[in-house]
Image: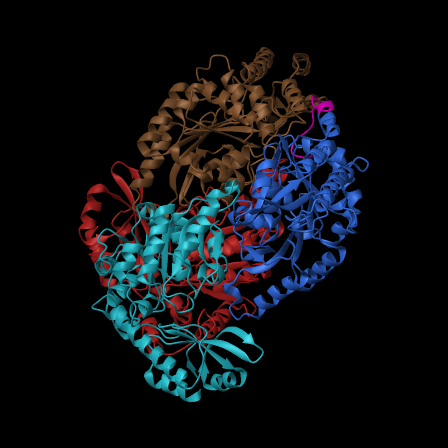
Chain colours: A cyan, B blue, C brown, D red
Amino acid sequence: MILFNNDYAEGAHPKVMERLLQTNMEQTVGYGEDPYCEAAREKVRKACQAPDADVHFLVGGTQANMTVISAALRPHQGAVCVQTGHINVHETGAVEATGHKVLALEGTDGKIKASQVQEMWKEHWADGAHEHIVQPKLVYISHPTELGTLYTKQELTDLRAVCDACGMYLFLDGARLAYGLAAEGMDVTLADIAALTDVFYIGGTKSGALFGECVVIKRREIKEDFRYMIKQKGGMLAKGRLLGVQFDTLFEGNLYVEMGRHADRLAMKLKNGLKEKGYHFYIDSITNQQFVIVDNEKLQEIEKNFGVNYEKRLDENHMVIRICTSWATKEENVDKLLDVF
Amino acid sequence: MILFNNDYAEGAHPKVMERLLQTNMEQTVGYGEDPYCEAAREKVRKACQAPDADVHFLVGGTQANMTVISAALRPHQGAVCVQTGHINVHETGAVEATGHKVLALEGTDGKIKASQVQEMWKEHWADGAHEHIVQPKLVYISHPTELGTLYTKQELTDLRAVCDACGMYLFLDGARLAYGLAAEGMDVTLADIAALTDVFYIGGTKSGALFGECVVIKRREIKEDFRYMIKQKGGMLAKGRLLGVQFDTLFEGNLYVEMGRHADRLAMKLKNGLKEKGYHFYIDSITNQQFVIVDNEKLQEIEKNFGVNYEKRLDENHMVIRICTSWATKEENVDKLLDVF
Amino acid sequence: MILFNNDYAEGAHPKVMERLLQTNMEQTVGYGEDPYCEAAREKVRKACQAPDADVHFLVGGTQANMTVISAALRPHQGAVCVQTGHINVHETGAVEATGHKVLALEGTDGKIKASQVQEMWKEHWADGAHEHIVQPKLVYISHPTELGTLYTKQELTDLRAVCDACGMYLFLDGARLAYGLAAEGMDVTLADIAALTDVFYIGGTKSGALFGECVVIKRREIKEDFRYMIKQKGGMLAKGRLLGVQFDTLFEGNLYVEMGRHADRLAMKLKNGLKEKGYHFYIDSITNQQFVIVDNEKLQEIEKNFGVNYEKRLDENHMVIRICTSWATKEENVDKLLDVF
Amino acid sequence: MILFNNDYAEGAHPKVMERLLQTNMEQTVGYGEDPYCEAAREKVRKACQAPDADVHFLVGGTQANMTVISAALRPHQGAVCVQTGHINVHETGAVEATGHKVLALEGTDGKIKASQVQEMWKEHWADGAHEHIVQPKLVYISHPTELGTLYTKQELTDLRAVCDACGMYLFLDGARLAYGLAAEGMDVTLADIAALTDVFYIGGTKSGALFGECVVIKRREIKEDFRYMIKQKGGMLAKGRLLGVQFDTLFEGNLYVEMGRHADRLAMKLKNGLKEKGYHFYIDSITNQQFVIVDNEKLQEIEKNFGVNYEKRLDENHMVIRICTSWATKEENVDKLLDVF
């Protein structure tokens, strides 16, 4: 069985494992205050061209999302996101469990537009009863989105402008950022993201680490006492250096983006191969997640040897399946998968 | 200025005030354990034909909603309701502030259908990743709804059946219940509601009391330790007897429903009068809330002497306004309002 | 049976009832935005000599406490209070239910000292692991305390100084403030309290109102969006003018303090009478709560005709009981009570 | 610098690293549903002699504590623990952040007694105002405690009996369980713990794993939907098999207890050595944490080459320091440390 279900089926990139092994018996202080974390933080700041950013390492994505959001908001404020946003559908209400409503907007290609945010904000403040309504205060976006799509630099710039105008925060979930940064034809760099958001994170779990997300904070209010928040939400690893060692490795040279490039290239190979065979796609993605429409018979055939994810049933005979490549995907397996279509 | 904005513009029904005055200098124990509360509880149980129900008096609707919902749910569970549901839009995220997601469904005439609930439940459990998704566990409906509409007995029976089949709770918000029970042509009685729901409340604030909602609980798990919950959520009035005295008065004879009947009759008079004049309604309501479509010019004219609520802008020149009658509305004021249209 | 259990056994002061009755059938807008609330706010600001303060009316004390505290704190911060503090023992964990730890300090006569707060703050920041510990950020005191004692002006000034030095908020719970302001020999005025705290409230429930607490906010951060917070926590009364009318009456002339004076005078009469009879007191209170030590036999005798509260069992044969006078207490009843001792 | 500060200064036991490396490029499904987790669960159930227990793997201790506690309690209930309990002092209010008060009891040697729990429970229910007080529902203990002490089998049996009698849950935090199970002279086995508690966890982070705690649940109500809770609280690792692989290794043969034995033996060597030199101990611990009293001068000398933890200042010239051994401690380093005393 070859799994294309997701991008976290394997362990870590061999270089990451090597470093973990090398440093295994060293003694360091805990909770992210060791030299490996410090070195990794420095590398991340440099890669982001954000020398004043605060950089923290958390274990997972749900944790990162709820910790950032609850650090940023007062009790009556909510997080705006697209209907399909991870915090809205796939985190068992983790954000609500910290007391905050998720305010969902209809998306286009998995994204929300600056104009929608502005509209929501205007409507809120124009409503005479706005004090009876959750106040939109933070915009949560994913890049790539749950549908593999990417925000353009212009779209991010527009969101930034609206957030500035409305006194809102812009938070970017980069769980799959490697695959976004590496996507061919995409114009958004890590420095752009750091420049245009208030806080974002660089995903490790889905991009070569055993686990771990690197939260980069630029906004002063969110920076303040953030380590208390990590601890309270259960995200402060005792052996914090495990995260430092991993991100230090991922940001050694260009490894992080190279891994993304590998996955994106194979995803494009798959996409083009399937297009040639006449397959249709649910959405046009240039990153490592591809959403293909297959009929039931074909699906059964595929599933004899390959793992894929069900995204959505289109009709009785057709399903949208998600196929993921990753830093670990072997080209020969993509070829084998193409053969079966 | 004559206000038709809502049904809580005046104080309490004169009989309520009289009883409060009569009992004012009496000494009673606090926190709802006095004889007035006990008498009122007994009257409510009788009116509901629910001798085993637990009856509690809370100060307000938001409080009642969040206290019931947080008493009923475990942390990973959510409350299903219609998009326009009060808990979803007009309580500043009070339910989320207790940690629970509100799961909104598209409504028809402000109502949700049993089949929608069943569908959501099926989808949840059919999803391989359901543990990553908030579990639907309680269905919240309003009767009348925010749009003045009512559930039929069949609709309530169907919701009950689905909730039973799915292991879900049915919670009915009766903030305007008086106006629902009194509506001409409606077949749902207080006893029906008590028989078909797990928990519901009988609104006082909008129906003749100074303030206060009477929560009736039939389900054992929600009954348990409910008074702790009231206290914790800030809803336990020190001078609890104020609520007892009020509900004892409202349930003396048929006062509660009579007040509703008065308001509904005037609402129908208004509705018919406006229809005759050619006005159109946003929704067909038989209760005290009427949603009329007016053009900007007319709206300006109305607002010279009358208060109405803006419900929704339809287009540049048309607005849906809400006109409320109540137990306190004078017929002559309805006539005056009709005249201006 | 004559109740001395507490100061909320009766309804409201007759003048309050009269105003409620007079205004009962008037129509006003809801949620505290009516002219009565505005007038009351103005009177309160004047009485506090705090023209820039924000003034809000909430229904009850638990509500006021949790709303203020959750408005003031970020998630990792806690409220410092004395062990016997109301929020620590008698609110069913309402503050914790908003996510915040209550950090209890040993008290002296029901009070905490500025030096204790400073010590706790120092210890927190000196601890290398302070990010693993709840950060003390707000000091909660009651005046009078749960034991009827009062902070002196010097003590409040010292607390203010420590709070300023430590970047902490000072929050005063004045549920029984009338009895504190009126206490003979006490040097703390309403203006002092307004000058020395960041936020406090003036109790109505225990001092002549049917219900209601008046929150006065001076600190900018706590002011911000406070009405959203009231709504979310279930404390925004639809017929908000009920609170306005009541506080407008209480602050008409000197009624609020006069009621307190009445109660305090009777409490002193009781205290002196009991002292003469050789009774001992658990604590030296000059306000309306008196804590007397009685043996079991005497207690039984008292309870034949009088209601009192059990405060604490001292030994097998002795109990501390709490006797409360109030604005409503009749002098003849105090005499009767004295007779039985 | 040789660190004796804690038991998580190094990475993982070499066997753990070896297995992680071996399995690194395998593909498995995520979120703990892989064969490694299943195998580890089976081994843990066997070691616990608890074939019906539910076994879950979480990333860290704070996470495990708050997830279990919030899964077990309704909103008005609290967790009873000793003043020095980890959840009470060192988790930045993580339990409170889920809405629950921690009810602290004075300890003896870091432990609480069954009689104290019973007393608290009795007092709660005897109090006429118990609905205004957080209801004690779960007893949280650590074994070993924060002071290195252990509950005897009799003490655990007594706690079990009281919990049964009072309808309370017994939850044991075994973050350092390896060192408890291995302690010479201790009569409590893993099977005893599984038999006597409702839920407990077996610590990995401090006992040979890179990270991870293994939660064992016996009580039906806590079992129910627990995976939703893990996900919501941010504890569900995408590459869940990392936890499975680690615990499968720790429970291969007797490795888990052997590691504990190594640490305990060295701790005893240190203890005996220091006693011979005339040093006094703050508490009598037979596990890997030793609390020694040193004067300032000696402390300075020690800290030139060794890391130790400050536990408590005794007086101006004396400090209690904590010295930890672990599975990774080298005997030669203990000798070197002894030399410096």
Say left or right for B74 vs A107: right
- Closer to the camera, B277 or D318? B277
Near-viewer residue (D88 or D141): D88
Taking the image as shown, residue A192 lies to the left or right of residue B210, namely left
In this rendering, is residue A201 above or below B127?
A: above
Magenta includes B23? Answer: yes
Instruction: Report the residue at 43% width, 65% height from top.
Output: A110
Residue D65 percent location from the top left of the image:
46, 55
| Residue A36 shown in magenta | no
Location of residue A124 in the rendering, given as x and y in whole percent from the top left corner: 48, 46
Residue A239 position by quadrant: bottom left
Q: Is residue D297 above or below residue A310?
A: above
Residue range corresponding to the magenta coloring: B21-34
Residue A265 location in percent, x, y?
31, 77
Horizontal placement of A319 versus A10: left or right?
right
**Magenta stretch mostly in which secondary structure?**
loop
